[in-house]
Image (cartoon, grey):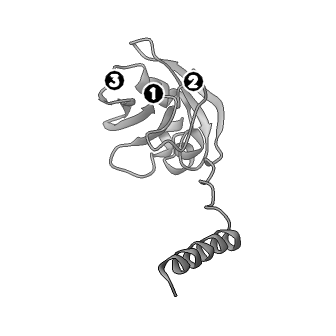
């Protein structure tokens, strides 16, 4: 078989493979999340920061279940202070909750950009993602008294 005949055969095999298998599959769609706002706070620098309902991975639905923070006042209290850590569009606000001699450090993480850093979630044109999580430092679940 000549080289030209082999090249034609290879091209025919490749074309048949595309017909049988179809084109490459499209990228997966972004996960569903609820963009509605549960709470909203303005920090001392004038940033308006929403806490969106979200889903199991981020937002109110995530941290109200997994981390047991179920009151807007907990998130709002931390955001009322200055930004304690900033990495690009990711902001961290640290607050304290007191009960007797017990002091809990509350961490509120904000994505102050339109999209999450991995690009999976998008708040929409002119919007900010807002609070993506909140938790008590050093523990997975905050104590129930925090929500009283």
Where's residue 55, x and y in %? 61, 45
Secondary structure of residue under mark 2: loop
Identify the image quadrant of residue 26. Answer: bottom right
Is 30 positioned to the left or the right of 1 in the image? right
Reading the chain from its start, which is encountered first: label 1 or label 2?
A: 1
Real-space Cα distance between discs 1 and 2?
9 Å
Q: Is residue 129 above or below residue 16?
A: above
Mark 1 = which residue?
Answer: 112
Q: Which mark is residue 12?
A: none
Local packing at callout 3 (Cα closer than 10 Å; few below 14, some 14-19, many 20+) is some
* Pick the front one: 101 or 69: 69
**In this rendering, which labeled residue sits more in front, label 2 or label 3?**
2
Real-space Cα distance between discs 1 and 3?
12 Å
Secondary structure of residue under mark 3: loop
Mark 2 = which residue?
Answer: 127
Mark 3 = which residue?
Answer: 83
Where's residue 21, x and y in %? 66, 71
At a point 63% along the width and 50% down the height, the residue shown is 29
């Amino acid at each position: 078989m000549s080289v030209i005949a082999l090249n034609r055969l290879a091209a025919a095999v490749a074309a048949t493979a595309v017909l049988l298998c179809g084109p490459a599959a499209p990228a997966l769609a972004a996960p569903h999340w609820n963009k509605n706002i549960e709470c909203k706070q303005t920090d001392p620098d004038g940033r308006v920061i929403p806490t969106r309902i979200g889903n199991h991975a981020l937002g109110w639905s995530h941290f109200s279940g997994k981390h047991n923070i179920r009151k807007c006042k907990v998130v709002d209290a931390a955001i009322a202070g200055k930004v304690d850590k900033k990495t690009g569009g990711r902001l961290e606000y640290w607050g304290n909750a007191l009960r007797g001699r017990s002091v809990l450090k509350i961490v509120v993480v904000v994505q102050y950009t339109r999209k999450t850093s991995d690009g999976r979630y998008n708040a929409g044109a002119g919007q900010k993602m807002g609070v993506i999580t909140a938790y008590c430092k050093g523990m997975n679940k905050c104590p129930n008294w925090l929500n009283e």
